[in-house]
Amino acid sequence: MSEFSDIIVNAMNIANVSEIAEIGAEYGGMTSILADYVEANDGHLYSIDPAPKREFLDWVAAHKKVTHIAKPSLDAFAKLKNIDLWLVDGDHNWFTVYHELKAIEEASTRDKKPFFAIMHDVCWPAAHRDMYYAPDAIPDEYRHNYCMDSGAKPGQSGLLREQGMRGMGHFGWALHEGGERNGVKCAVVDFINEAEANGRAMAYAEIPAVFGLGILFDVDAPWAGQLSDLLVPFHDNPLIAKLEQNRLANYLTVLDWQDGAIG
Ligand SMILES: C[S@@+](CC[C@H](N)C(=O)[O-])C[C@H]1O[C@@H](n2cnc3c(N)ncnc32)[C@H](O)[C@@H]1O
């Protein structure tokens, strides 16, 4: 997510963000950028990840403005109050992301804050295919059939055994792409449609680079116009989308070479 840091920091300045919740820290690449921001703005960062890397744990121990919550996101919301911005980059499946957005909506309404969330992985490969870090944590009725060692390639609904983009045992993919309640973008669209049906008008911008960044906020937030001015040039930009297609093709070619060299 740190590839988007310039845009995210500009957005945080526009919205005068102070308290931030980050879902999914891993090595802490984005966390350190958010930490610099809250240190300069007298804010606080809550970083939620049940299983971050050792490097993050060592780093967070030395940072007073950052609190690590070692829980899955949906168990952590009760601890989080008065959050101005939520970064969503944890478990990339419909059940988790949809319920994260619902919990963010509830928290922002309770705390009288505008809804403001930034989600990673809204484009391929997780846009319309569930990814599971912890498949057992997803209720059976929401979990698609999945595989922990097969990989995804663009344009193919099925998975390929030991080929393509895959989790090597760390995470699994749903066996098929598309359909109902499948993937991060699907969760975002379902959430927006429900919010709008309930009278909450949302603005959504999508930057089609590095697996996709989605920025979702209340249309009537006091800073919505200024934030829109920042995001419009990036939103659904066809040149950026072409560059991402090319990046993915190169990346998958390297994976094919590696798989050939290993196999
Ligand atoms: C893609 S990485 C996050 C990368 C990070 N945001 C960055 O920009 O460098 C996903 C992280 O989400 C964590 N994770 C998985 N399930 C989660 C959940 N339910 N709640 C919070 N974090 C979760 C994983 O442990 C992993 O470290």
Image (cartoon, rainbow, N blue to C red):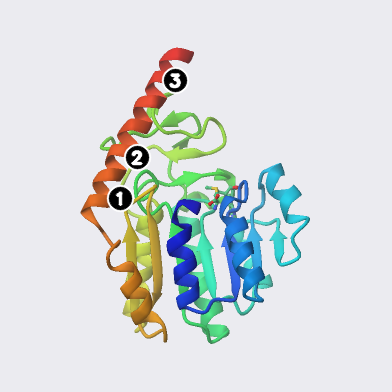
Image-quadrant location for residue 184: bottom left
Q: Residue at x 58, y 45 (%)?
A: 134
Q: Tell me the crowding category of disc 1: few under 14, some 14 to 19, or many 20 or more residues within 10 angstroms, Cα based.
A: few
Identify the residue position indicated by label 1 in the image. Answer: 179
Q: Residue at x 47, y 48 (%)?
A: 143
Q: Tell me the crowding category of disc 3: few under 14, some 14 to 19, or many 20 or more residues within 10 angstroms, Cα based.
A: few
104 w.r.t. 93: above or below: below
Q: Tell me the crowding category of disc 2: few under 14, some 14 to 19, or many 20 or more residues within 10 angstroms, Cα based.
A: some
Circle number at residue 258: 3
Identify the residue position indicated by label 2 in the image. Answer: 176
Q: Residue at x 53, y 68 (%)?
A: 86
38 w.r.t. 53: above or below: below
Most foreground residue, 118 or 163: 118
Q: Residue at x 33, y 68 (%)?
A: 231
CB under 8 Å between discs 1 and 2: yes
Image side of residue 240 versus residue 257, left or right: left
Q: Amino acid at mark 1?
A: Gly
Observer able to see residue 1:
no
Distance of label 1 from label 3 (alpha carbons): 32 Å
